[in-house]
């Protein structure tokens, strides 16, 4: 199937690019070229002909070869401060997994008597770990870490006659919790950083705390609905508390005491989070001089790099740092490079005038007084597109276009863009939609039909919740 999809991409991408070139004859040369390149890249991203990051680089290379971008500036985004924030936060997450801090946290939560009292509470234990960790650690790392624990626990729970196995709902719920939790902080999911960068280009600066204050209420509302939704399904499943207690106790006995590396990682993590949050508090309290000082000398990217360097410097054991050279190759470089190349492509959509031209066309259909309809359509469109492509790629492609639409309609940019960015992480129906979906699907315990049936309701509710919050923020 993968070979068929790749072959389809190799055929469809150039054909669609040529078709777009002829259909956009009324546009300027640069806008026509960029439109054709973006369609070409979008098909490559959806069919994964080559790694996602290499598709972004191919798009920039085509822009250079056709003369719409200069080689001196085309790849400048690879040195963007947000790239450094990506690298630093990924290394921080790598330290957590290297020293088993994430597993210690999961087993500590699950060993509490509160979470063992019922099947729903046990599910809540797994999902809350997934939800909170994914705010700070890669969603895929979080779910991959929890996967063996979930399978181990759910396989031990006796499937009583007339009851379903809870494995399906535990796996799906944990994956969904990671995606929902990831929207809560700037570093929780790549589309968040992409949105922040595009807003910054429009003169709108969002600090770490401001993002949390805007995104966390949306995240909590969606997570609350997920818990109620999963509780309905879990009522159809049996539960045996004793085997869960035995399983958790056994794993705790096998687990070594918290190593020094995990303690160092925890200390550095809390230092980084504090430095990320402090500027926002100064801003809220009106301490302008302190806010300027912190954002100048302790910007998010600076703090992330400082945290990463401390992990290499502070020893976890004699002669060895908490992170080692080998850890550098184990972080998600594909996403980092995708961001760098993709932001260059996104910038071309704006500078070529393509975003404004698309905005003008859409304004002929929708009017500014149809704001609710516009926001809902944009959120739903991005959410559905994310089902069949990387959420990072969709954010890179469509956020600048949506900014162009909002500018043409003379509407505020901040909150609709926030809504669209959050929608990039709210794809729950298909394995290809998000890494957490793909990981639980790979367990072979989650049929694709079950994921579609369960996820379609979450997609619909997610679009409504995001739209409601966007309208509420704009009203306030």
Image (spheres, rainbow, N blue to C red):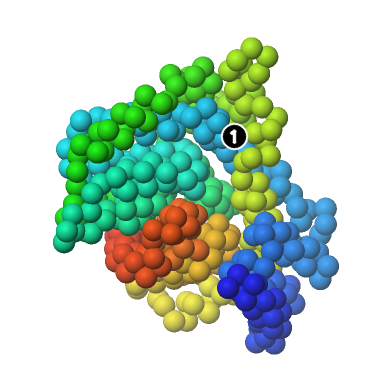
Determine the residue positioned at 36% across, 52% down. Answer: 171
Up/down of 393 relative to 124, above or below: below
> How many numbered badges does the structure rendering display?
1
State which quadrant residue 103 falls in: top left
Note whether residue 367 is visible: yes
Determine the residue positioned at 25% across, 46% down. Answer: 157
Q: Position of residue 20 (x, y in %)?
A: 66, 82
Q: Quadrant of the N terminus?
A: bottom right
Q: Position of residue 147 (x, y in %)?
A: 42, 46
Q: Position of residue 274 (x, y in %)?
A: 45, 26
Looking at the rendered structure, the secondary structure element under dot 1 is helix
State which quadrant residue 53 falls in: bottom right
Please tell me which residue lies in front, 404 or 343.
343
Please tell me which residue lies in front, 307 or 328.
328
Question: Which residue, given by chain and number where applicable, does mark 1 sit on?
Answer: 91
Q: Position of residue 271 (x, y in %)?
A: 49, 23
Determine the residue positioned at 55% across, 31% down. Answer: 98
The residue positioned farthest toward the top in the image shown: 318
State which quadrant residue 353 falls in: bottom right
Note whether residue 475 is visible: no
Please tell me which residue lies in front, 315 or 15.
315
Residue 25 appears left or right of 143: right
- Label 1 neighbour load within 10 Å: few <14, some 14-19, many 20+: many
Determine the residue positioned at 70% across, 30% down. Answer: 325
């Amino acid at each position: 199937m993968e070979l068929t999809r790749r072959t389809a991409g190799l055929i469809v991408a150039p054909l669609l690019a040529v078709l777009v070139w002829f259909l956009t004859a009324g546009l300027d040369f640069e806008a026509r070229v960029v439109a054709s390149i973006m369609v070409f890249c979008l098909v490559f991203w959806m069919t994964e002909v080559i790694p996602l990051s290499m598709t972004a680089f191919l798009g920039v290379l085509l822009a250079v070869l056709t003369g719409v971008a200069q080689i001196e500036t085309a790849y400048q985004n690879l040195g963007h401060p947000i790239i450094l924030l990506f690298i630093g936060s990924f290394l921080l997450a790598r330290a957590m997994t290297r020293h088993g801090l994430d597993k210690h946290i999961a087993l500590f939560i699950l060993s509490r008597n509160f979470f063992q009292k019922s099947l729903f509470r046990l599910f809540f234990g797994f999902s809350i770990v997934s939800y909170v960790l994914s705010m700070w650690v890669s969603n895929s790392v979080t779910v991959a870490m929890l996967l063996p624990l979930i399978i181990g626990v759910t396989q031990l729970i006796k499937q009583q006659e007339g009851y379903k196995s809870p494995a399906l709902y535990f796996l799906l719920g944990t994956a969904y919790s990671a995606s929902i939790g990831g929207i809560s902080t700037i570093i929780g999911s790549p589309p968040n950083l992409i949105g922040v960068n595009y807003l910054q280009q429009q003169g709108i600066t969002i600090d770490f705390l401001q993002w949390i204050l805007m995104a966390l209420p949306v995240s909590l509302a969606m997570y609350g609905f997920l818990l109620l939704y999963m509780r309905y399904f879990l009522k159809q499943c049996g539960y045996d508390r004793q085997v869960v207690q035995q399983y958790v106790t056994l794993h705790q006995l096998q687990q070594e005491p918290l190593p020094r590396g995990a303690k160092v990682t925890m200390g550095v993590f809390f230092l980084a989070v504090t430095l990320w949050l402090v500027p926002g508090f100064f801003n809220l309290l009106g301490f302008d001089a302190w806010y300027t000082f912190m954002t100048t000398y302790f910007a998010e990217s600076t703090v992330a790099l400082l945290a990463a360097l401390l992990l290499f410097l502070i020893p976890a054991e004699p002669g060895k740092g908490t992170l080692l050279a080998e850890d550098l190759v184990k972080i998600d470089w594909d996403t980092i490079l995708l961001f760098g190349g993709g932001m260059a492509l996104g910038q071309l959509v704006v500078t070529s005038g393509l975003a404004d031209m698309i905005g003008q066309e859409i304004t002929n259909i929708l009017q500014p007084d149809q704001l609710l309809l516009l926001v809902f359509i944009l959120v739903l469109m991005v959410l559905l597109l994310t089902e069949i492509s990387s959420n990072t790629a969709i954010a890179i492609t469509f956020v600048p276009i949506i900014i162009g639409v909002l500018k043409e309609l003379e509407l505020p940019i901040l909150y609709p863009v926030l809504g669209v960015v959050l929608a990039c992480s709210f794809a729950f129906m298909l394995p290809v939609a998000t890494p957490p979906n793909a990981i639980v699907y790979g367990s072979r315990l989650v049929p694709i039909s079950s994921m579609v049936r369960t996820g379609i309701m979450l997609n619909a509710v997610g679009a409504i919740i995001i739209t409601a919050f966007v309208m509420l923020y704009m009203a306030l």
